[in-house]
Image: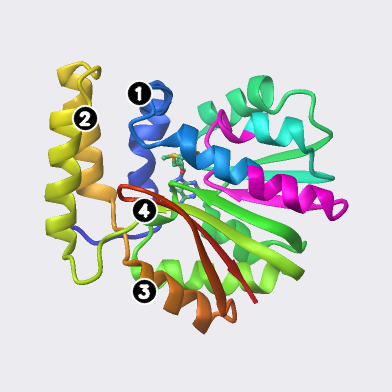
Amino acid sequence: MPEACTNHDETTLFRQSWTLYDALSEMNYMFHREVYEQVGRLLAERHEAGPWSMLDLGCGNARFLGPCLHRTPPASYTGVDLSPAALEEAGAAYLKGLGRVTLRCQDMLEAVEQDAENHDVIFSSYAVHHLGSAFKQRLFQACSRRLKAGGCFLLVDVAREEGQSREDYLEGYIGTMRSEWKRVPPAQLDEACAHVAAFDFPETLSTLTRMAAEAGLTKSRLIGRHAQHHVLVFEA
Ligand SMILES: C[S@@+](CC[C@H](N)C(=O)[O-])C[C@H]1O[C@@H](n2cnc3c(N)ncnc32)[C@H](O)[C@@H]1O
């Protein structure tokens, strides 16, 4: 079994074939529409409470987050990603016109561990499962330190069932990709399946909740679940 890590190999798909991920999300195979409807509602609630700031870890091109932010603009937004192509699109298209936007080409764990600012909302969508367990634990610790009082870590990600091995998870997920993702051309589907097999290290919900609690984020809420895709909120 390959070891998960924070080296940058896991982002190859996104750096070299950003358009493939973009196409997959547009086809809604990972439930982006449903997930971001829920994210948008949570951000609207936060917006009602007054000015707020956001750090987005693994922001990609912010294609789905962008419209939420345009509806309820944060006082400041910082997006972090390792893909220059995705960041360029984020700035030039999906986040264009928003007030204070900072985009950083950086490893997300490094970014949050070295961050000098605190945030009201730390967000990460479909990126944390690329990290190995020890790095996820560090990420929760760093996020907990970087949240303002009353802030939250809003996590969108795939998760394994309780007791399910990574191998069984992959068999199920890749099986669904091969049987359901019919609009993806075969060569690109092979590429996407190979990426998942090599770089996806999802945890169970109980492990994520435990990691969060150990980092001081003792309140957790499951906002939504769409097959393996989850929307979670962690707070102190
Ligand atoms: C599946 S995409 C998700 C993009 C966007 N957040 C969304 O919801 O559609 C995962 C993103 O995480 C980025 N990524 C993966 N590992 C990373 C890391 N260690 N540091 C920063 N970005 C990373 C990839 O470059 C990619 O843009």
Q: Quadrant of residue 163?
A: bottom left
Q: Which residue is mark 2?
A: 191
Q: Which residue is mark 1?
A: 20
Tell me the kind of residue under disc 1: Leu
Mark 2 surroundings within 10 Å by alpha-carbon count, few (fewer than 14), some (14 through 19), many (20 or more):
some
Q: Which residue is mark 3?
A: 206
Q: Earlier in the sequence, mark 4 or mark 1?
A: 1
The magenta stretch spans residue 46: yes
Q: Are marks 2 and 1 in contact (CB under 8 Å)?
A: yes
Q: CA distance from mark 4 to mark 3?
A: 18 Å
Q: CA distance from mark 3 to mark 2?
A: 30 Å
Point 18% across, 55% down: residue:
169
Magenta residues span 41-65
Q: CA distance from mark 4 to mark 2?
A: 16 Å
- Residue 21 x/y as whole percent: 38, 29
Q: Secondary structure at mark 2?
A: helix
Q: Secondary structure at mark 1?
A: helix
Q: Are marks 4 and 1 in contact (CB under 8 Å)?
A: no
- From the image, which quarter does the N terminus lie in? bottom left
